[in-house]
Amino acid sequence: MVLKVFFPSCCASAESGILIGRWISEQNSAVILAVIHFPFIPVQVKQYLSEVQRVTKVSVSVLGSWSNSKWEKEESLSEFLEDLGTIFSHEPWIQISKEGDSKFWSCSTLQKNSNNPKEEEIILVYYDQRKVMLSHLHPPLDTAASTDHKAEDASKLSAIFDTVAKSKILFMTDRYDDGPIKLTHWQSDGIEASIIVELMKQASVPACMLLTFLLSLVSGVCRSRKANIFVSLLIDVALGLLLISWLYRKNRIGHLADTLIPVADHVAEELQDLLQWLMGAPAGLKMNRALDQVLGRFFLYHIHLWISYIHLMSPFIEMILWYVGLSACLGLTVALCILSDIIALLTFHIYCFYVYGARLYCLKIYGLSSLWRLFRGKKWNVLRQRVDSCSYDLDQLFIGTLLFTILLFLLPTTALYYLVFTLLRLLVVIVQGLIHLLVDLIDSLPLYSVILRLCRSYRLAAGVKFRVLEQQDGKPLRLLMQINPLSYGSVVQTYRLPTYSCYPKDSWTSLCKKLFLGELIYPWKHKGEKQD
């Protein structure tokens, strides 16, 4: 059976001592966490490991010995290291030694309690202890396509990552402490090694210090989702303040208010021209003149009401825009949502035209469908929600024929008005939908995770890859374990924040069906909610 030994690369130059770590019997693997140097007292080592095991809930023990011949020249050292196996009873006892400046290592195991000791094939895997401790191993996103073999490999890797991540208390002891135990691990240089970093912080500009403080605050206090929310909120407010500084500079609010009234008048004039075109012979189509004139004058009257309303509000528009612009201090998304509401108010007459046309068209469609069932001797059973057979007398058939003929010949005129105003309404809905998509993008984009993937890709691990360092007969296979970071698409998919989306949730088939039948489309409604 293959024995896998995960050895931290930071301990490659450590002085001789004993190896402490976790033995994973299910995988026949040993995860080395640190090296305890000579001299030490075995009783104190056992007490220290029991305390670490109590705090971390990880079964940390002495797994073997480490010999660095570059530091130790005594011939009796190897015999002494073998004798330590009787004090710290662990099966198998792992012995790793480095042959001076040579690149070759020797790794062997001792099984004193076994009656039939077997020579095991050993694979020595180096890993970056700091990166493994700080990284978070993500499961495969496509669980349906992942095989059982991949899931098993992911569980094995997660056991190794969890072992290193839960052993943070072990890395707080460095070789400069006054205690009786001296350790070598990724943080063994202790506080003294961070003096240069602290000097660089003091010499940096205040903006860099503020950025470092915010990043440490986010990474230390917040995790994943909370960190993404915090960064998104920070950027949202910053963009809002930039918008405020742009709006209130050079009296852009006044220019915007002066432009708004002529634009509204121009839109009203274009609608009047469109209605005049519909009241004639649009595209050479012969319409029902009486109904065409009634509908055209009805909509023209609403346009005149709308123009009067706009001119009545014109003295207050600049003041309204001035106060609305201040809402951007709450974030760019707040300003965009208010902009969407302003567009809805400015196009309220278009919405009214769409509702009138849709209701009239829907009434005729359902009337024609009901009268068509009458011709076939059918009727709609409301209680059972199905079509049943029914016998009609001559008077009912005569009246049904008259109504069907009237509705059928009036349908083209109504359908043309409905088509035109539906296209206008869809244009407004598309503009509002783009605004809401931008709001959702700002609110849901995991900016902190994306920045973390860009700057420290090892923090978001999708898996590992192994690179062969040494492969020679009689020597253990030496591999280097490297972290495979998550792709940017997987980062966005995994850490995307949930939002209340305001765009339609219906499928394209359902949307086309509603448009054909004349049912109202509410872009702010969710699928499954009751609609009139």
Image (cartoon, rainbow, N blue to C red):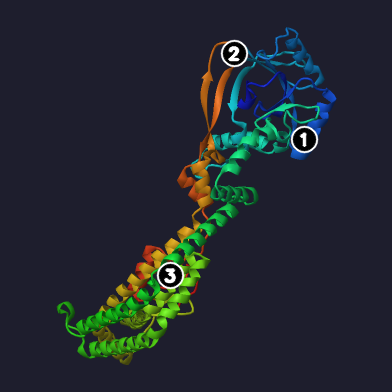
Q: Locate residue 1: give its quadrant.
A: top right
- Label 3 vs label 1, nearer the camera: 3
Q: Residues within 10 Å of mark 2 (few under 14, many from 20)?
A: few
Three-letter amino acid code of the residue under disc 3: Tyr
Q: Nearer the viewer, residue 136 or 155?
A: 136
- Label 2 vs label 1, nearer the camera: 2
Q: Which residue is mark 1?
A: 53
Q: Which residue is mark 2?
A: 101
Q: Which residue is mark 3?
A: 248
| Image-based side of 409 in relation to 181, left or right | left
Horizontal and vertical percent position of residue 429: 37, 70
Residue that protrudes farthest toward the left in the picture: 284
Q: CA distance from mark 2 to mark 3?
A: 69 Å
Three-letter amino acid code of the residue under disc 2: Asp
Residue that protrudes farthest toward the right in the picture: 43
Q: CA distance from mark 2 to mark 1?
A: 35 Å
Q: Locate residue 12: give its quadrant.
A: top right
Q: Dot 1: what SS?
A: helix
Q: Which mark is residue 88?
A: none
- Whether 32 is drawn above or below 318: the answer is above
Of mark 2 and mark 1, the one earlier in the sequence is 1
Q: Dot 2: what SS?
A: loop
Report the residue at 25% width, 89% height from top: 291
Horizontal and vertical percent position of residue 495: 53, 51
Of mark 3 and mark 1, the one earlier in the sequence is 1
Q: Quadrant of the C terminus?
A: bottom left
Q: Nearer the viewer, residue 220 or 161?
A: 220
Contact flag, marks 2 and 3 (Cβ < 8 Å): no
